[in-house]
Structures are given as C-alpha cells and as structure tokens.
Image: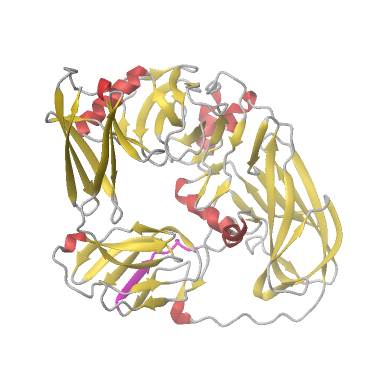
Amino acid sequence: MSFLVPLLLSSALSFGSPVNYPISLSGNFGEPRPNHFHGGIDVRTGQVEGKPIFSVADGYVSRITVGLDGFGNAVYIRHPGGITTVYCHLKKFVPQLVAMVRKWQYQNQTCFADLRLRPTDFPVAKGQFIAVSGNTGASKAPHLHLEFHSTKTWDFIDPLDYLKDFVTDTTKPIAHSFMAYPVEGEGLFCGSQRKQSYGFTSTDLTREFTAWGKVGFGIWANDYMEGSYGILGVHRTTLKIDGVTVFESVVDSIPDHCNRMVNSWGDYDHYCRTHLWYMKSFADPGNTLPMLHAGTADRGIVTFDEERDYHLAYTVSDVFGNSRRYTFTVKGRRQSIPKARRRSVMNMLWHDRINSFQRPGLMLLVAKGLLPDDVELSPGVKVKPSALSDEWSFYGKSYPLFDWAKISLRLKHKVKYPDKLYIVSHYGVDRNMGGTFNDGWVTGRMRELGASYEIAYDDTPPVLSSFSVSAGRLRVLAYDKQSGLRSLKGYVDGRFVLFEYMEKAGVYVCNLKDAPVVKTGKVHSVKLVAVDERGNYSELHETFKY
C-alpha cells in the first residue's frame, strides 16, 4: 500500500506536539462523515482562539492557503522522508508568513490565497512557532485541525501514528449494535429480506438469530478517549465467523480519490435518516477502499448454507490497541428465499462500465468507477413550457456519486447571452453546476443522483450593500443568489486594497491600518467591484473620512 513508504522513510524523523499542553481530541482520523472521511485529528484549544501552534517536525513551509477547502487559514509543512503536515482553521500566521501572504494577495488582487513556497523560503525546525489557533473556514468551534499526508501521493495518514506519545488513551471502543443485510433474492436473516439492527445489550448476546443464504453485516461503534468528550471513529474492526476472519477494516491511510467512498462503506441511507453510521463489514462491488480487507471471495458477504450454529465475533480496536469483543450466534435454518425484484434494464446504471443515459432533452454520462453498485434509476421530468429546460430528476432520495459525472440539457428557448447559461441543481439549496453552451445544449457536472437539474440563466448583477466604516475598518455585504459570487475587489483613491472575507459574519472587511491608505483625516473615495460566476458585475461608490 502507498502509505508504507512514507511511514518507513520518516521513521528516523523526530516528531513533537503541535501544542504546548496535553493533547485532547474532539475528532480523530478517519471518522465517517457525509461525502468524506475526517482527514486528520481535531486538537482542542480550550474553546478559545489564539493558542500557539508549532511545527511537529523539521521541514519547510511549502504552501499557505487562505479561504480554500474549508480550511480557513492553513499552513502546509513538508518534512524529510515523504510526509507533509497541514495545520488548519488558524487565526493568524507568524508575521513573516503574514507578510508573504499579503504580498501574494496584493499581487493577485484577491483575498483568497494559494501561495507555494520553495524549500529555502521558510525552513522550520521541530517545535518552531508558526501560527496561532483559530476558528476560520468551515470550523464550527475553535480548534486545530491537523492532517498528515504522503507528500508523493497525497494519501491521508493517521497523525496518531506519529503523535502517540503526546496522547493518553486507555479507553476501549464501544459497539452499540449490529446490522444484518440480506442480499436481495439470495438471503434471509431472521426470516426477512430487509436489513435489521440489533443492540449489543451485552458483549455476548444470548438471543438466537437465524439466517439462510447470503447475508452481510455492519456495526455501529464509536471510540472514546479520556479527557475528551467527543465521539470518535473506530480504528480497526474485525468480523470473524467460527474463528476465521471474513472482514477487517483498518483506518490508517485513505487515498484522496477514495474520500467519497465513505458513503459506500457506511450505510449512507441509514445515516441520512438517523445520523448514525453503521459501517459495513463487506465491500460494495464498486468500493475500492484499500483499507477494507475481505477474507472471503464474496467481498465479506457471509453464506449460510449449513443447518448449524455459526459463531460470529466482532472486535473493535483503537490505534492504541484498546479493544472490545462482541459475540452472537446465528443458526443456519434452511428456508425458501423469495426471488429478487426484476429491474428495468433501460433505467440501469452499471458500476463497472461507462453509462450513457439519454432521454429527449437529456444526456447523462457516468464514467466507470463512480458508483458503489449497480443502481436502477427512477427518472422523472417536470415539464416546464416557459422555462429554459425541463427539470430532470433521477432517484427518489440522496445517492451521491464517487466523483463528477457529466449532464447535458437541451435549451428550449433562445437567450441573448448564451455564456450566462448554467445548470442548477435543486437539493436543499440551489447550486451552480457550471455550464457551457454548444449547439443547443448546456453541459455541466453533477454527483448527486437525488437532486433535480435544469438550465438557469443569470444576467443579474451581484448585490453590494450595507457599506459601513467603524474603528478603522471598511465593511461591505456582497453576495449573489444565482450563479454565485466569483470575486470582490476594492479600491481606495484608485488603488487596490484587500477586503478579506469574514466567513462567520458573511461580510468583507478592509482593515485600513494594514492597507496602503494614508491616514490624512480627509475624505477618501472607495470603489467596490463584485463579479459573479456568469460574468455579471456591479459597482458601489462611497466615501469615508480617515
């Protein structure tokens, strides 16, 4: 596996703590979340911002980002031996890095930054102060999100493989219940073809279960840690039957391109209804997560074909070796299995081939490898005679793809500016799926079969409002409710000044003391220009005394 090389190469490198106090975690590596695994560890900062953050090892700052990937302010440090660490949701960088970022932002005239550095630009030693903790980006509370990556492949690696010495954990994981998944048309569990869950009222269940044919299993379990009130993910899960391992998962490395496969390993449909993750002890046909290991030829699916007792045992373990074992018995009982429901071949998408799904006015192209399993669509169309296209839907509930598919819709009415066309998805909130116009069709992208899609047209400028001046700061509200805001630029007395996006407040702010504005006590002019994703723009002209 790809993560072995960096693990071995970096073994001689000395690692330290990213903070100067005992580490307590509110989130651990590989926790299942909708559409992604938790790619690092969340280190508590006492519910406050401003705690010093240190490099965990020798290396150099290779990248700094602002406002990207939900990370807020983030520092990337490349270390010898093939490891890169990422420190996220920071409040502020050290002054030298702040100066580098500011220079880049002014050169590129944008508040969002992606600055790449050379090895000689900013070398760091283990324990060197690099930033202070914060709550920027998609963070919901102050903390440090820390990731470890293979520099070569960018695979996610468990930071606790390197930082165990700074974390105390003697608490065993706990399994709450298991789920049985009879294979449609091929298996029964307790006389039913439906999936069923059963609580672990003890570590050794005495209730008798019955099964016949093919059945998969899953488990709802969490890890816990002293000094931490969070519910954490389980590092290792093993399912054995009569002492033989039929499935094992080890959450130690996650390839970046496999991130959305969490929806396949976990019971995504159950999570959508309950917000509880049952992780399957079998792999869907299209799930290629390398950390899932099936001990049977049938991807971990168990075949009950003898009338006898089958002894099942689950073991859940954390990265420190704390573990707990749960057992139950399933009696093989011969019984008739109803045939599987016949599916419509015309509405099928197949996980192991390229799919081209077409209807009048619609073309959907789903590449091989984007589906966890074969899926039967339930296509629907809402005819809209006066709209730019009809509105298409494909599935009755959420069904996320592993990556982007291509969708094309035929334009029903001519428009003045075809470059302002795009495809919008409706699912909770409307989202711009992009769009290019060619020969009567608009083509965009999609990765949620549960959403509905139609062509939209945006020739409306973004909104600029609520301009104010207070305590040496200029504030403005900028947004676009259709295709979305692409950029905001500000100019004071004709010269570019940086307006930073305050994500939590939803406003843009210019701190005049950090801007190239001379304080004269006189009136200054400000011009703000907002541009949306379809090229529409609006300007706001104001004056202020400074």
Front one among 468 and 376:
468
What is the count of numbered marks?
0
Q: Where's residue 172, x and y in %?
A: 74, 39
Relative side of 495 to 69, left or right: left
| Residue 524 appears in view | yes
> Considering the image in quadrants, where does the C terminus appear?
top left
Q: Where's residue 540, x and y in %?
A: 18, 41
Relative side of 422 to 283, left or right: left
Task: Tell which residue pokes out farthest to the right in this image.
Answer: 206
Q: Where's residue 263, x and y in %?
A: 54, 56
Relative side of 242 to 123, left or right: right
Task: Tell which residue pokes out farthest to the left in this image.
Answer: 494
Q: Where's residue 452, x and y in %?
A: 40, 68
User: Vertically, is 427 above or below 105?
Assistant: below
Front one among 324 and 502:
502
| Model colouring | secondary structure
Residue 46 is drawn in which quadrant?
A: top right
| Residue 405 appears in view | no
Residue at 25% x, 29% y is 104
Residue at 33% x, 22% y is 98
Residue 188 is drawn in which quadrant?
A: bottom right
Residue at 47% x, 71% y is 395
Magenta part of the protein: which range? 361-371
Residue 364 is drawn in which quadrant?
A: bottom left
User: Vertically, is 251 above or below 352?
Assistant: above
Q: Is residue 465 magenta?
A: no
Front one among 543 and 60:
543
Relative side of 25 to 382, left or right: right
